[in-house]
């Protein structure tokens, strides 16, 4: 990773509290600044007036060069107040310990208002030091410097995070002194890691460890057993299950539907249609909730961020809009919970293992090119891989209007029917952590009208706890 470098203003001087608005706390997000001014007005007073107001740098520079009546230079803002300042400056401490040196040795560091300098600082954004707790902030910055220098940058166990551990906001140290590292830890521990001394949390494996003892949804053979149960148990007849594809050795006593009789006996994966899964009311409600949450351009995961979370990018292979049903008004809706309970009853997998509904809207020209729902990197994450996909059609598609789901390995084309659901595995039943590439599928182009659908992906382990811990 390219080593990041930020500029640290060498003239940090303790300022009056009137120059900085106070910061509040918002859980899981950066603390917000409050006060009469805008957040953009926050600044450190380089040279405060006697009444606590701030001079701008030009005024400060001019006043620093004025002479007093007795002919002496007015350098009250540019003095050394320690006897060993010159010695420390000669050792390079103006750069290695800027907070201390610029508070006590401005003259030796050549950091007077008339000749301000900028020094490289490897720990992120310049930190605001002002307000009633300025001394506490200064002390915390010094402690963070020791932490970074003696621990993160020197010990091999921190090699994976040493080049990406930065304070990513100028108020990190101020917030840390106000207890935000504990109150708002999910955001602070990765965005203000030096101030919170939590650089190791930038390693996704440390912040979000995989509990190998956690029960998995499926062990070897369980997926075949689940599908056979769906196809044969009287309870599931209400959903009108149809095996559109199934393994040759499946013990259902039923004949799957094939386009070509010669395909019978081939080793195909399970693809089961539940033709009567949702009611009209349930379908209409999901479409409505998607509108409440807001349909946005669909994105896909590509690479990872500095903290190990997935990066999102506009999809090159997908032209659709989606609404994620993780907001309270959608996820906790009575109908949503009713549908989730129905899915849990069919799959016998705990609801916590499932992602949130992705409610989809495909307009004319909308499509999704051939893809697999399996994400390989999930194998080494707390939630495990996506074992199952349930795709639910929320409205009907007229003949020749497009929008069909296509499985090329089986040459299987499914036309959307309101209330019908398609259930298929993304993994092999014999090894439920390994990808089954045979269920790669596509959504054909919508030729006219609008197609609504909902996806639900079911993981091997608990998905929702890591989600709320910002681990996936």
Image (cartoon, rainbow, N blue to C red):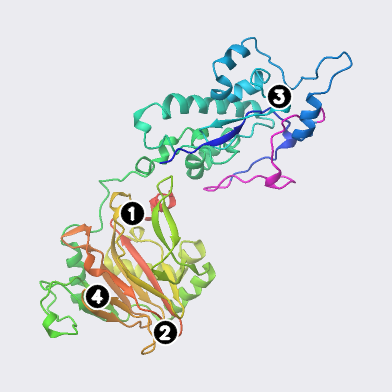
Reading the image, the residue beneath label 1 is 462
Q: Tell me which numbered mark, 1 or 4, is placed earlier along the sequence.
A: 4
What's drawn in magenta, residue-wise? 26-51
Does residue 266 appear to the left or right of 456 in the view shown? left
In magenta stretch: residue 32: yes
Q: Which residue is mark 3?
A: 112
- Which residue has dot 2 on it? 447
Q: Give the residue drawn at x 50%, y 37%.
A: 166
Q: Nearer the viewer, residue 82 or 384?
A: 82
- Give the residue number, with chain letter if any, for mark 4: 408
Q: Residue 303 got which mark?
A: none
Marks 1 & 3, CB-CB < 8 Å contact: no
Note whether 342 is above or below 154 in the view shown: below
- Choose between 165 and 452: the one closer to the eye: 165
Image quadrant holding the N terminus, namely top left
Q: Residue furthest top?
A: 83
Nearest to N terminus: mark 4 or mark 2 = 4
User: Element under label 1?
Assistant: loop
Give residue 13's position: percent from left, percent from top: 68, 27
Which label sits in the foreground, 3 or 2?
A: 3
Residue depicted at 27% across the width and 69% down the height: 440
Mark 3 → mark 2, Cα distance in angstroms:
69 Å
* Side of 35 relative to 219 (left or right): right
Q: Is residue 447 visible?
A: yes
Q: Residue at x 66, y 28 (%)?
A: 11
- Within 10 Å of disc 3 (Cα), the crowding (few <14, some 14-19, many 20+) is many
Decide if residue 384 is in sight here: no
- Give how far apart the Cα atoms at labels 1 and 3 are: 57 Å
Q: What separation in Å lies between label 2 and label 1 (alpha carbons)?
A: 38 Å
């Amino acid at each position: 990773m390219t080593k990041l470098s930020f500029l640290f203003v060498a003239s940090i001087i303790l300022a009056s509290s009137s120059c900085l608005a106070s910061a509040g706390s918002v859980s899981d997000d950066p603390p917000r600044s409050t006060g009469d001014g805008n957040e953009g007005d926050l600044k450190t007073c380089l040279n405060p007036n006697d009444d606590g107001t701030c001079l701008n740098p030009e005024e400060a520079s001019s006043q620093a060069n004025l002479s007093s009546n007795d002919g002496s230079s007015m350098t009250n803002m540019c003095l050394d107040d320690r006897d060993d300042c010159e010695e420390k400056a000669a050792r390079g401490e103006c750069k290695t310990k800027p907070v201390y040196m610029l508070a006590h040795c401005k003259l030796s560091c050549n950091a007077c208002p008339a000749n301000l300098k900028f020094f490289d600082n490897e720990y992120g954004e310049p930190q605001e030091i002002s307000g009633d707790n300025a001394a506490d902030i200064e002390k915390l910055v010094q402690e963070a410097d020791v932490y970074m220098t003696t621990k993160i940058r020197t010990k091999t166990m921190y090699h994976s995070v040493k080049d990406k551990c930065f304070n990513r906001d100028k108020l990190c140290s101020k917030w840390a002194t106000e207890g935000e590292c504990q109150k708002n830890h999910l955001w602070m521990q990765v965005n203000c890691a030096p101030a919170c001394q939590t650089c190791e949390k930038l390693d996704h494996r440390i912040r979000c460890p995989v509990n190998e003892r956690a029960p998995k949804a499926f062990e070897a053979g369980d997926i075949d057993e689940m599908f056979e149960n769906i196809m044969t148990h009287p309870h599931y007849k209400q959903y009108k299950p149809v095996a559109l594809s199934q393994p040759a050795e499946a013990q259902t006593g039923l004949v799957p539907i094939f386009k070509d009789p010669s395909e019978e006996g081939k080793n195909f994966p399970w693809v089961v249609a539940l033709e009567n899964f949702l009611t009209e009311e349930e379908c209409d409600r999901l479409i409505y909730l998607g509108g409440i949450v807001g349909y946005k351009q669909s994105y896909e995961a590509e690479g990872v961020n500095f903290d190990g979370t997935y990066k999102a990018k506009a999809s090159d292979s997908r032209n659709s809009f989606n609404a994620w049903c993780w907001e309270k008004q959608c996820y906790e809706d009575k109908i949503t919970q009713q549908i989730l309970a129905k899915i849990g009853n069919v799959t016998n997998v705990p609801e916590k293992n499932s992602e949130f509904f992705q409610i989809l809207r495909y307009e004319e020209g909308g499509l999704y090119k051939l893809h697999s729902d399996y994400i390989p990197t999930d194998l080494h994450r707390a939630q495990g891989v996506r074992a199952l996909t349930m795709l639910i059609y929320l409205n009907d598609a007229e003949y020749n209007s497009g929008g069909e789901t296509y499985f090329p390995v089986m040459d299987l084309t499914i036309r959307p029917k309101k209330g019908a659901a398609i259930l298929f595995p993304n993994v092999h039943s014999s090894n439920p952590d390994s990808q089954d590439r045979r269920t790669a599928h596509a959504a054909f182009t919508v030729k006219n009208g609008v197609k609504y659908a909902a996806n639900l992906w079911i993981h091997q382990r608990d998905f929702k706890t890591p989600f709320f811990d910002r681990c996936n």
